[in-house]
Image: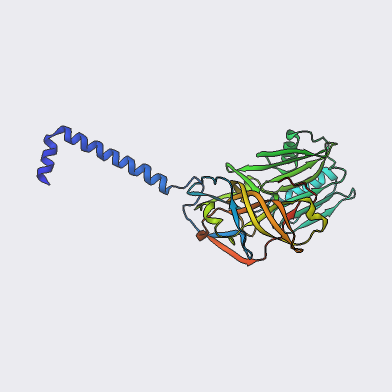
Amino acid sequence: MKKFLKLIKKNKILSLVLLILIIILILFLVIFLGKKKTPESGYSSNMEKIDSPYPKWSKELNIISQTQLIEIPKNDKILTVTGFNSTVVSVLIEEVYNSFQEINALEDFYLQLSNKDIITYAFDTGILSISSAKGVPLDYEINSQEDIKQFLSRYLDIKEFKFEDETITKGVTKYSGKYLIKETEIGSSFLNGNSFLIEVNKDAKIIKASVLLINESYVKEYQYLPLVDLKELITQSSYPKKIGEVIIEDRYYDTPSPYDFTEYILKSVSLVYIFNDIESRHIVPTYVLDGEAEIKDSYKEKHWSKVRIFICAVDPSYLYTKKDILQEESKEEEGAPFVR
């Protein structure tokens, strides 16, 4: 060792090379360990198990993929919802309908006003719903996305969001979108993956609105958890999942009856941050599947349908699974045309 040190002292070039190698090694360790161990600002470095947002299915569903599956990060963010901004419901009722109603944030709420408008708030999902045959009596018309922005900001304290779709069917314009919270696009599984759904009639009045009542103040950073490729999850036919919108071909409605899914053909998939309900509390990375499903009704008749499915993307080993229950009753859009 002493001879080696003497050699280094005598050989300046060797000393310089060793010094450079030591500096490179230190920089490598700092960068590598920093990337590996330092969580994004505000997120815990712990990796604790969370509740699965959906229960396991008691019946199996065979999913056949006809699309290229997407690339996903190794780990992804989990956020937590601490409550809902239900105070805006009272404000909206007072300002728009000139009626005072006290809202308990921890209870469901139902109100039918004198003009027959119906306002409901569901505590478990945090969703405010408005139904109005003649149109919500605002002091301005809804003719564009800018007017929707004004409505959400003025009455519901929602500032940052992104429009997903705007369609017109039989004189009704439908707007949908997701909130932008903590630099994350967020949707609800009860709103087909959106944060709001709003319908406007030909008179430029809102006739239906369903809105998730969260904003920046009610969402907190939590932690990062490992994700699992969809290809691995869809091989587990009873893996926890939730059915979103279901549009069945017209002839089913001639004699509608209970039905089961027999096969699902996956056409497209995306990764979205989805909130389910206050029981599971978290906003989690979720695969949103769009495809066609074959269903069999109680008369043994088979029909085709367009179906959206939500599957939690988090590694199952980090999920507390809910008890097996019967498949959730699907939402249907009655009379919707089906083109295969």
Residue at 65% of width from left, 53% of height from top?
83
Instruction: Report the number of discs.
Output: 0
Q: On the rendered structure, is 75 left or right of 4?
A: right
Extreme residue toward the front, this view: 301
Extreme residue toward the left, this view: 3
Residue at 79% of width from left, 36% of height from top?
142
Q: Where is residue 243? Give x, y as percent.
A: 67, 55
Between residues 14 and 172, which one lies in front from this camera angle?
172
Q: On the rendered structure, is 116 left or right of 51?
A: right
Between residues 82 and 296, which one lies in front from this camera angle?
296
On screen, residue 170 above or below 249: above
Q: Where is residue 184? Give x, y as percent.
A: 58, 43
Between residues 300 and 137, which one lies in front from this camera angle?
300
On screen, residue 171 above or below 249: above
Q: Where is residue 149? Give x, y as percent.
A: 72, 37
Residue at 15% of width from left, 33% of height from top?
12
Q: Where is residue 100? Give x, y as percent.
A: 83, 50
Q: How is the image coloured?
A: rainbow
